[in-house]
Amino acid sequence: MFYFAHLSILMLGNFLAMEWSTGLNHELGRPALHFYRAMGIAVGIYCIVVGVPYLLLWKSYKKAFVSFSSAQDEVVVSGKAPEQQTPIVIGAAVIALAVLLAAAVFLLTRAK
């Protein structure tokens, strides 16, 4: 829920701030000649339109974060520990990197 609200605030706020600042810049006349003024207006409107709701969302998220899980929700999982699988993943990544590097060297140094 919070991620959807975060995305909504950023996207819709961006669109709204862009349209409001574009309209204001065109009303003030010749926005291409006053680039820094136009960017200042856009940043100011964006900070107000997005910053205030985002700050309020962050404050409510911090208050609600402690209630996301409880001790009764704990689940015991059996199986291999993640530490045992880490060397395999690292080994595969090293081999893949070596193959890519060898292919790059071959392609860059072949006779033309």
Image (tube, rainbow, N blue to C red):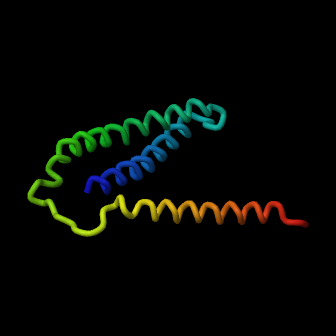
User: Would you say 101 lies left or right of 53 here?
Assistant: right
Q: Position of residue 92 (x, y in %)?
A: 52, 65
Residue 17 found in image quarter = top left
Q: Position of residue 51 (x, y in %)?
A: 36, 38
What count of labels does the image hold? Answer: 0
Q: Which image quarter is the C terminus in?
A: bottom right
Check the image and name the residue furthest to the bottom. 79
Above or below, 35 relative to 9:
above
Q: Position of residue 84 (x, y in %)?
A: 36, 62
Check the image and name the residue furthest to the right. 112
Q: Position of residue 71 (x, y in %)?
A: 11, 54
Q: Residue at x 61, y 61 (%)?
A: 97
Q: Which image quarter is the N terminus in?
A: bottom left
Q: Residue at x 35, y 58 (%)?
A: 83
Q: Residue at x 35, y 54 (%)?
A: 8
Residue 39 found in image quarter = top right
Above or below, 32 relative to 75:
above
Q: Residue at x 26, y 69 (%)?
A: 79
Check the image and name the residue furthest to the left. 72
User: Would you say 39 lies left or right of 75 here?
Assistant: right
User: Would you say 79 lies left or right of 87 here?
Assistant: left
